[in-house]
Amino acid sequence: MRAGLDFSQLVTFDDGAPDGDISWALYRLDGTEITSGMVTPAANAVSAVILVDGAFNLFAGGNLREMRELTWAYTTGGQTRSGSADYAIEGKVPFPVSPSGVREKLGVTAKELPDEETDLIGAYWELGSISSDTALAAYANLETADAYRIADGIEALAALEVLDTLQVRIAKMESSGTNEFQRGAIDWEMLRGRLGSLVSRATDILEPANAGGATGGSLFVLATISDDFSG
């Protein structure tokens, strides 16, 4: 979810309508409380919505991703009911990248690879670890040819991260008739090589002293995006 937007959580009353208000609180990953509030359900309601204002979904410092934990509690028939939900807020990668750019490199549709399954932030962090965060920062927010080539490398890393599972997904969709069209046989290894060359081109720009030293094979080992929210 983009930072600064409102977050809504549906709470269903499976055991009956609450006796009174629903209390809720929002926390950071380290357990620090950000805000809290109360929701008054309508009479005989079967559910209610907790709305977290976007002002509480903003970043501290220069992070690109932060976790939030929303907890809630209420009583029904004198018994306490509680729940929680985790969600991530995300900033904008400082390069001209997009989920559609990742899909174009893979030759797939939004149905086959939805936006939310494309981890551009993770790919951006990964490129910084392959080259260096300092070198990457020097091209941030620029509209130059090299910045666009680096953006291609970030999108290629994001594509590599989903490539293996995408093969299985597409095969299942086509065999079940879910896809609206049948494409020809995909040479997945050729596609992997093409994506690797885009990553290599980006690392050559970021680390010119080592240009040509990292081949596609070694990049495939490195191009595993960590499921890490630390930034």
Image: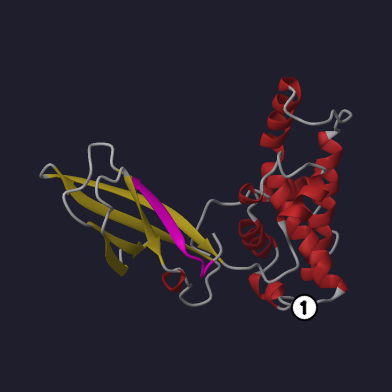
Along the line of sight, which residue is nearer the eye, 220 or 20?
Answer: 20
Name above or below for residue 131 compared with residue 114: below
The image quadrant where one finds the N terminus is: bottom right
Q: In the orientation shown, which residue stands out farthest toward the left?
A: 78
The residue drawn where x is 31% and y is 69% is: 35
Magenta stretch bounds: 3-11
Residue identified by numbered label 1: 142
Q: Secondary structure at mark 1?
A: loop
Evaluate whether residue 79 shows in this view: yes
The residue drawn where x is 77% and y is 48% is: 103
The part of the image, by quadrant, that contains residue 188 is top right
Evaluate whether residue 207 shows in this view: no
Mark 1 is on which residue type? Leu
Question: Left or right of 104: which side holds 91?
Answer: left
The part of the image, by quadrant, that contains residue 98 is bottom right
Percent from the top left, x then y, of residue 161? 67, 46
Question: Left or right of 169: which side holds 104?
Answer: right
Q: Residues within 10 Å of mark 1 (few under 14, many from 20)?
A: few
Question: Left or right of 194: which side holds 36?
Answer: left
Along the line of sight, which residue is nearer the eye, 100 or 39?
Answer: 39
Report how many numbered discs are placed on residues in the image: 1
Q: Is residue 22 magenta?
A: no
The residue drawn where x is 78% and y is 45% is: 217
Percent from the top left, x then y, of residue 63? 52, 71
Percent from the top left, x then y, of residue 131? 70, 65
The residue drawn where x is 78% and y is 65% is: 150
Name above or below for residue 93 compared with residue 98: below
Q: In the orientation shown, which residue stands out farthest toward the top?
A: 175
